[in-house]
Each structure stands twice: as structure tokens, then as C-alpha cells.
Image (tube, rainbow, N blue to C red):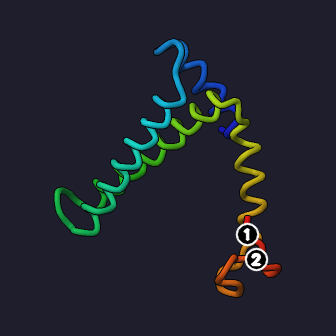
Amino acid sequence: MNLTQLQNEQAAWAERNFGTVTVDSQLLGVMEEVGELAHAVLKSEQGIRGSRELHNAEAADATGDIVIYLAGVASTLGIDMEQAVTDTWASVSQRDWRKHPETGRADGSEG
């Protein structure tokens, strides 16, 4: 599945299940899932409340949920998620923080 397909399917699913959704509700969902991801990573590092396998499964679930909620955020804002990720990765992947620790870029620009 690509991001465009995910975004289209998520938008249709959200409409069918919840009616109109707001960017606020989608963003709050992202934030909730980031908290669940942080919890899984923390407990795994602490070695408590379950096995590493359990925490990794919880982290994987939270990661998937984050992407799904982000698809909803993008849809609500009219953003083509696949294009946004492609464009942003094209920029980010050019950065070299070891060679250029101030900005990540040879020309010193930020962005």
C-alpha cells in the first residue's frame, strides 16, 4: 500500500465511521499514539511491565496508528501526504549533520 492509497482509504473509513472529522481530533489522535509509543519504548528500556517482544509489538501498533492519524490530518488539511513525504525526504536526505553540524547543509542554509 502506498501513502496515497492509505490516505484515500483512511478518509473514506473516517467519514463512514465518524462523519465529519476535524484536524484537531486527528491531531489529538496522533498525540495520544505518540504517548503510547513513548510508553512502550520507555518500559522496554526499563525492562518492566512486559517482555521486549510485547513492548516492540505495542510500539509497532502505535507507529501504525500514528501514520493512519497523520493521513487523516493530511486529508483534513488538503495535503497530498505522499507528495509531502516525497518532497520533504528529498530535502532531508541531502543533509549531512556530521560534515555540517550547524545546519546539516554545505551552504549553511537552514530548511
Q: Secondary structure at mark 2?
A: loop
Q: Position of residue 30 (x, y in %)?
A: 46, 41
Lower sequence index among marks 2 and 1: 2
Mark 1 is surrounded, within 10 Å at the Cα level, by few (under 14), some (14 to 19) or many (20 or more) other residues, namely few
Instruction: Kindly indicate whether the residue at mark 1 contacts the one at mark 2 (C-beta within 8 angstroms).
Output: yes
Describe residue 29's horizontal placement relative to residue 44 as left or right. Answer: right
Q: CA distance from mark 2 to mark 1?
A: 7 Å
* Residue mark closest to the camera, 2 vs 1: 1
Farthest left residue in view = 49
Residue type, label 1: Glu
Disc ID at residue 17: none
Judge by depth and name the residue closer to the eye, 29 or 60: 29
Q: Position of residue 6 (x, y in %)?
A: 63, 33
**Residue position for label 1:** 110
Q: Position of residue 13 (x, y in %)?
A: 54, 20
Describe residue 70's horizontal placement relative to residue 48 as left or right. Answer: right
Quarter of the image with the N terminus in it? top right
Mark 2 is surrounded, within 10 Å at the Cα level, by few (under 14), some (14 to 19) or many (20 or more) other residues, namely some
Q: Secondary structure at mark 1?
A: loop
Residue type, label 2: Arg
**Residue position for label 2:** 105
Describe residue 106's horizontal placement relative to residue 59 as left or right. Answer: right
Q: Quadrant of residue 45?
A: bottom left
Quarter of the image with the C terminus in it? bottom right
Q: Quadrant of residue 103?
A: bottom right
| Residue located 31% across and 58% down the image | 53
Q: Position of residue 46 (x, y in %)?
A: 22, 68
| Residue located 78% across and 60% down the image | 90
